[in-house]
Structures are given as structure tokens and as C-alpha cells.
């Protein structure tokens, strides 16, 4: 996909954490990058500026992936950059630790709307553009899952874990649905990664606290997740679809 000089990668949540590094690495591989952000405009514009300073092309677009109109606008901005051939469904939310017995409907709706519905909406727009059946060039989609999908998040984040379990099913199902349309769909499932997301879930020291309990005895970095994401977008992964790749230090 990176052989196309107008190839565009859409990266949701592209201003911080894993999404930030994915955006920078994708630009380094020759993609023009359309990165979405929901609140931190400064961080997102900083990523776009760094890509431009290195000779690439990028645009930062405010996008709440739970809102259909925002997703449509994000992809319209991507279309103005070139031809969409890659999507990284990175945007996601966590919440404060709580048992299921204390979870409100509002919390559950927010979790599923962002983590699940948002990924579906972005994939819908990507498939419409990529499918060779409708004149597209093909492409690749990478979803961000989590090893929480199989660990369950008991007592703290069962809703988050369930949303990532849905992403795993979505990845396999969509991969099979569009395999003959020139589109590959895979997921990366991180473990304990040292990013800002833990602070938004009320546990800013989670990576430091849990890292020593991982078989590799440390938390991972955003760079260690972003690299396999960008590999899955590349032609080096041309025969890989429907895969869920653990990036968890053996956890």
C-alpha cells in the first residue's frame, strides 16, 4: 500500500499515545496521514506539524468516533489528502475501576459507542473507499484490541474488556467479509502499555505498578505497539488477515 504516492492512512485517536506513534511511523512509510482527535487539539496539531517538518503530509481533524457525522467528516478530510488505503481504529475510552454491579447505563453506552460503534463506523467508511468491488485500490484495517478481551477485567473494567472482545469478533468477521475485495483486517492486542490512557481511567500509575508482574518484567511502550500496527498495514503482511496479534510481553 505504501507504494502509492497519494496513499492516506486514517488514524483515530492519532494525537497521543499509541496513535501518535502510529501516525509518525505511517508517515515515515510514505503515507499521508489524516489523524483524528477528540479533545487535545494542541497535541494532534503537533503531530501533524512534526510530519510536515519531516517532509510528509498530514491533517488533524476533530472527531468523536461515536458520532456518525464526525466520522463522515473525518473521511471527507482524508479524501482531500489522497486515496484512503489504511485505517487504524485506535480511538478508545476506559472508565474508573468499578464492579459490574456499580456500572450505569450511561457508562456502558459511552464505552460501547466509542470502542465498538466507532470502530464499525470508521471501518464502514474505509471499506466503501478501499473495496476493489466498487473501484477502490484495496487496503488494510488494523483495530486496537486488548488482552483484556480474554482476561476479562474482573472487578474493574469488565465493560472495557467486553468492548475489546467485540473488537476481536469484529476483526475476524470483517476480515472474512472483505477478503476478496482487496482489504485485509487485523487487530493488535496490547497488554500493559505505558500511555496516558491509564490516567483517564483513574489509575495513572498502573503501568509502573503492574509492569513487574508481566513475564517480561516491565510495561510496554507505545512504540512497541505502533511498530506491529504499521507492519500489518504494509505489504510485508500481504497474506495476513483476520489475525489478532498479542503485544503483551507474554502476559
Image: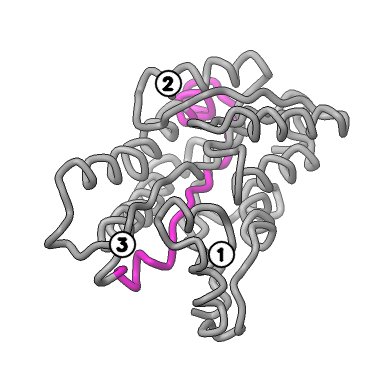
Q: CA distance from mark 3 to mark 2?
A: 29 Å
User: Where does label 3 land, which residue?
Assistant: 97
Does residue 139 appear left or right of residue 101 in this picture?
Answer: right
Residue in view at x 52 percent, y 39 percent = 183
Image coords of residue 232 (percent x, y): 62, 52
What segment is highlighted magenta in the picture?
126-153
Q: Earlier in the sequence, mark 3 or mark 1?
A: 3
Q: Nearer the viewer, mark 3 or mark 2?
A: 3
User: Farthest left residue?
Assistant: 101
- Label 1 element class: loop
Where does the image place residue 15, in percent across and percent down from the top left?
A: 61, 38
Mark 1: few, some, or many residues within 10 Å (few <14, many ≥20)? many
Q: In the rendered image, which residue does mark 1 sit on?
A: 193
Nearer the observer, disc 1 or disc 2? Answer: 1
Counting labels gives 3
**In the image shown, does 89 or 64 lie closer to the viewer?**
64
Query: Please, is residue 66 above or below residue 101 in the view?
Result: above
Which residue does the numbered mark 2 point to in the structure image?
A: 70
Amino acid at each position: 500500500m505504501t507504494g502509492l504516492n497519494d496513499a492516506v492512512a486514517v488514524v483515530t485517536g492519532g494525537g497521543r499515545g499509541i496513535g501518535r506513534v502510529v501516525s509518525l511511523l505511517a508517515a515515515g512509510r510514505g503515507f499521508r496521514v489524516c489523524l483524528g482527535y477528540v479533545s487535545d487539539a494542541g497535541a494532534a496539531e503537533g503531530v501533524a506539524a512534526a510530519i510536515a517538518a519531516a517532509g510528509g503530509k498530514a491533517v488533524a481533524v476533530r472527531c468523536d468516533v461515536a458520532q456518525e457525522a464526525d466520522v463522515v467528516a473525518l473521511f471527507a478530510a482524508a479524501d482531500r489528502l489522497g486515496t484512503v488505503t489504511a485505517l487504524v481504529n485506535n480511538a478508545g475510552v476506559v472508565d474508573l475501576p468499578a464492579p459490574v454491579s456499580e456500572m450505569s447505563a450511561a457508562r456502558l453506552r459511552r464505552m460501547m459507542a466509542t470502542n465498538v460503534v466507532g470502530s464499525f463506523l470508521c471501518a464502514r467508511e474505509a471499506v466503501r473507499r478501499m473495496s476493489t468491488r466498487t473501484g477502490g485500490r484495496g487496503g488494510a484495517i488494523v483495530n486496537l484490541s486488548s488482552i483484556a478481551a480474554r482476561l476479562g477485567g474482573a472487578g474493574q473494567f469488565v465493560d472495557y474488556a467486553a468492548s475489546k472482545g467485540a473488537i476481536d469478533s469484529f476483526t475476524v468477521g470483517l476480515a472474512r467479509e472483505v477478503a476478496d475485495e482487496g482489504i485485509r483486517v487485523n487487530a493488535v492486542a496490547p497488554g500493559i502499555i505505558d500511555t496516558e490512557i491509564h490516567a483517564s481511567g483513574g489509575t495513572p500509575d498502573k503501568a509502573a505498578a503492574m509492569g513487574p508482574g508481566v513475564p517480561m518484567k516491565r510495561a510496554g511502550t507505545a512504540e512497541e505497539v505502533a511498530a506491529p500496527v504499521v507492519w500489518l498495514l504494509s505489504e510485508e503482511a500481504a497474506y495476513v488477515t483476520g489475525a489478532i496479534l498479542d503485544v503483551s510481553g507474554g502476559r
